[in-house]
Amino acid sequence: MIRLPDWLARRAALHPERPALIAPGGRWSFAELHVWASRIATGLGAGGLRPGDRVAILAHNHPAYAAAIHAAPRCGAVLVPLNTRLAPAELAWQLADSGATMLLHDDAHAQVATGLGAIPCLSLTSVAAQRPAASEPGAAASLALDAPHTIIYTSGTTGRPKGALLTAGNHWWSATASALNLGLHTDDRWLAVLPLFHVGGLAIVLRGAIYGMPVVLHERFDPAAALAAIDDEGVTIASVVTVMLQRMLELRGDRPLPPHFRCALLGGGPAPRPLLETCAARGVPVVQTYGMTETASQAATLAPADALRKLGSAGQPLLPLELRIVTADRDAAPGEVGEICVRGPMVTPGYHNNPVASAAALVDGWFHTGDLGYLDAEGFLYVVERRSDLIISGGENIYPAEVEAVLLAHPAVSEVGVVGVPDARWGQVPVAAVVVAAGHAPDGALAAEVLAFCRARLAAYKCPRSVHFCAALPRTASGKLRRAALRAQLISSDE
């Protein structure tokens, strides 16, 4: 078993005064953040957390959240970040499925957390109440690279989310691979506006400690604040999704970004080519990435030097990850579309509590992503579609099967199909086509009732923007829903 020193503790020993975390509430050096993490770990232990336990966290981005990310491994615990946008029923299911024995929450989610009533709750505010002194001693255990570090739930085609298990080694190799591609500069500062419950936000916090690099953390995305962080806080790298970048460009206008800003990592699905062309014309350094929760963030990222030469590409697989494109029975030829498969030390060892999904995804060491893409003659990846039925709205993944399962529970819904339609602001939004059950009238009142039923059971971003009633859904001869035909039908009806 390979072990590494606790990343944050090592940085605190090597560079105690170097800034580690910058947020609207203050600044923390590596020494301060190290002691703070140890203090939180002590509080978690006093609250009953034991080695091997799983601790869930339900909170907005906050410096204490970042400290808690480093604290959980010091207890020997596995961290389960929860999406703050989920409905209580969804949160309760993830708590039960993960086997979490403690729920750590911020003040904004105290009522929701205690209302779940499943496990003991601990206030993040109270456990991290005092700002630590750099002189206060703090102990930290080493990290076993094959030990479970995180369980992050990602939507699944079966209608239930899957808990992707990520080890300390997955995170370590992901950080190492990214650094080999982007390089590390002595003045680097990484802006974290993605939620820390997403693998993209979590990865930034971990990389800050691994690299010895300051992380500039915002509670939520605000285009003006993000631009100010680039201008005034010296941010050199930012991770964003398409809708975020669009809003920043709209606000910035023709005014160029400062020369120290070297990279905007653009994820959350294939980027619209006009957006990339606009960035190129304005001199905004943008590189596309391709990744997922199951690869601990990036799997492929376009190198900055290739940003213009390979416009639209997600780059090459990050060393040491291997990537192949597979058709039904063979590896695809250059330019031929097939399923993207990956193998390497940053790939999840499987899904928690779900051996069937693990066995289906991991075949002979290769993780089958379900995404479609192709490699050009130089080995650069182009993503054609992020899972054929996946809806990506503002960077959030929405699986139609999960939404359909909720809608079918309504007594007036006989059949339903959910697809994503283009949206100028969010890229895509979900809409539903419903065949009503006998005895119900397909009118506006029923549409409102169905939408309210959905909102009570799902996160708001997953709920259909509209309900369209139809006599029948387009299906194949075998009865399979023809999503492409349904999508075209719904788009046509709105024109």
Image (spheres, rainbow, N blue to C red):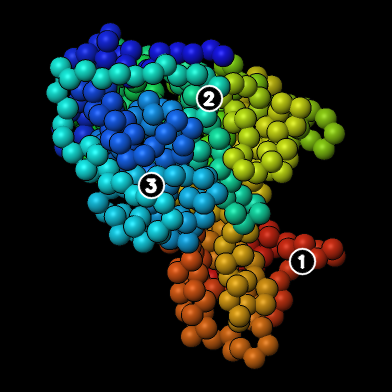
Indicate the amino acid at tag 2: Ala
Which comes before the other along the chain, label 1 or label 2? 2
Task: Kindly report which numbered mark, 1 or 3, lies closer to the viewer in this rendering.
Answer: 3
The image quadrant of residue 80 is top left
Q: Position of residue 104 (x, y in %)?
A: 34, 45
x%, y% of residue 82?
Answer: 43, 47
> How packed is label 3: few (under 14 Cα within 10 Å), some, or many (20 or more)?
many
Q: Could you say whether the residue bearing mark 3 is in a helix, strand or loop?
A: strand
The answer to whether residue 402 shows anywhere in this view is yes
Q: Residue at x 27, y 43 (%)?
A: 124
Q: Is residue 486 above or below residue 315?
A: below
Foreground residue among 179 and 90? 90
Does residue 40 appear to the left or right of 382 in the view shown? left
Q: Nearer the viewer, mark 1 or mark 2?
A: 2
Residue 251 x %, y %? 27, 45
Q: Is residue 392 above or below residue 377?
A: below
The residue that disc 2 covers is 147
Say which quarter of the image contains residue 101: top left
Distance from label 3 to label 2 (Cα)? 21 Å
Q: Which of the two discs, 3 and 2, labels the residue nearer the N terminus?
A: 3
For residue 298, say whether it is visible: no
Looking at the image, the residue that sits furthest to the top is 14
Task: Name the residue tied to disc 1.
Answer: 475
Q: Identify which residue is drawn at 62% across, 22% down.
A: 344
Tag 1 secondary structure: loop
The one of 168 and 300 positioned closer to us in this rendering: 168
Tell me the number on the disc at residue 103. Answer: 3
Q: What is the C-alpha distance between the residues marked 1 and 3?
A: 44 Å
Specify the quadrant of the image occupied by residue 417. Answer: bottom right
Q: Identify the residue at image location x=77%, y=66%.
A: 475
